[in-house]
Amino acid sequence: MPKNLRHDPLPVFSFWVDLGMGGQAYFKGVAGLRYETETIPVRAGGVNNTTYNLVGATKWTNLVFKQGFTKSSQLIQWRQEWMQGKSMNRIGGTITQLDTAMQPKAQWTFMRGWPCKWDVSEFDASKSELAIETLEIAHDGLTYKAI
């Protein structure tokens, strides 16, 4: 089979993120690339052997970004500005998955995102781990395209 016709699975460790704040960001992890459409069960009068499932609204899961915490974190600054009402801008962004040769292969784009939750990992003097900050972004939709 010619190499260009192969569709090898993509690794989960190779990706970059553009949050629309100027430049690409690298994260330890990204989660929440998920959405579902509700089903609305309806019983029809006189039909006792089945329930019909109607199509409901599509729900978007919050995107969750994790990275090592630094004193100049743009993520916590954005969350604080949002909470204080200084800059309540919604942003769009992309998550791009790379192959093992570091070439872009898949991309998810979210629309009208805003920082709904931020936290930092537990401080524990008995561990020798990095502090990890987590930012959740609520958004109004997610699209996918193969590159």
Image (tube, helix red, strand yellow):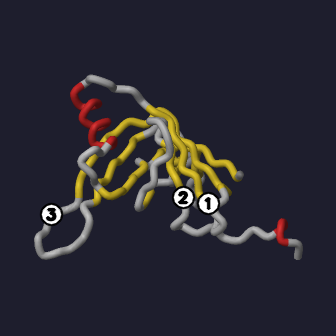
Counting residues from the N terminus, which is met first, the one under dot 3 or under dot 2? 2
Q: Extreme right residue here?
A: 1
Residue 109 is situated, as x and y percent measured from the top left of the image, at 57, 43
Residue 35 horizontal side relative to residue 116, left or right: right
Q: Amino acid at mark 1?
A: Leu
Q: Which residue is mark 2?
A: 15
Q: Is residue 92 above or below residue 45?
A: above
SS for dot 3: loop
Instruction: Using the rendered view, name the quadrant where residue 122 is placed.
Output: bottom left
**Residue lying at 41% horizontally and 48% vertically, measured from the top left:** 62
Residue 114 is situated, as x and y percent measured from the top left of the image, at 38, 36
- Residues under labels 1 and 2: Cα distance? 5 Å
Q: Amino acid at mark 2?
A: Phe
- Residues under labels 3 and 2: Cα distance? 28 Å
Q: Nearer the viewer, residue 117 or 19?
A: 19
**Residue lying at 28% horizontally and 59% vertically, measured from the top left:** 132
Q: Which residue is mark 3?
A: 123
**Residue lying at 67% horizontally and 59% vertically, measured from the top left:** 103
Q: Amino acid at mark 3?
A: Phe
Residue 92 horizontal side relative to residue 146, left or right: left
Q: Nearer the viewer, residue 42 or 114?
A: 114
Q: Which mark is residue 98?
A: 1
Q: Are marks 1 and 2 in contact (CB under 8 Å)?
A: yes
Mark 1, Cα crowd under 10 Å, few <14 / some 14-19 / many 20+, is: many
Q: Nearer the viewer, residue 50 or 67?
A: 67
Counting residues from the N terminus, which is met first, the one under dot 1 or under dot 2? 2
Residue 127 horizontal side relative to residue 86, left or right: left
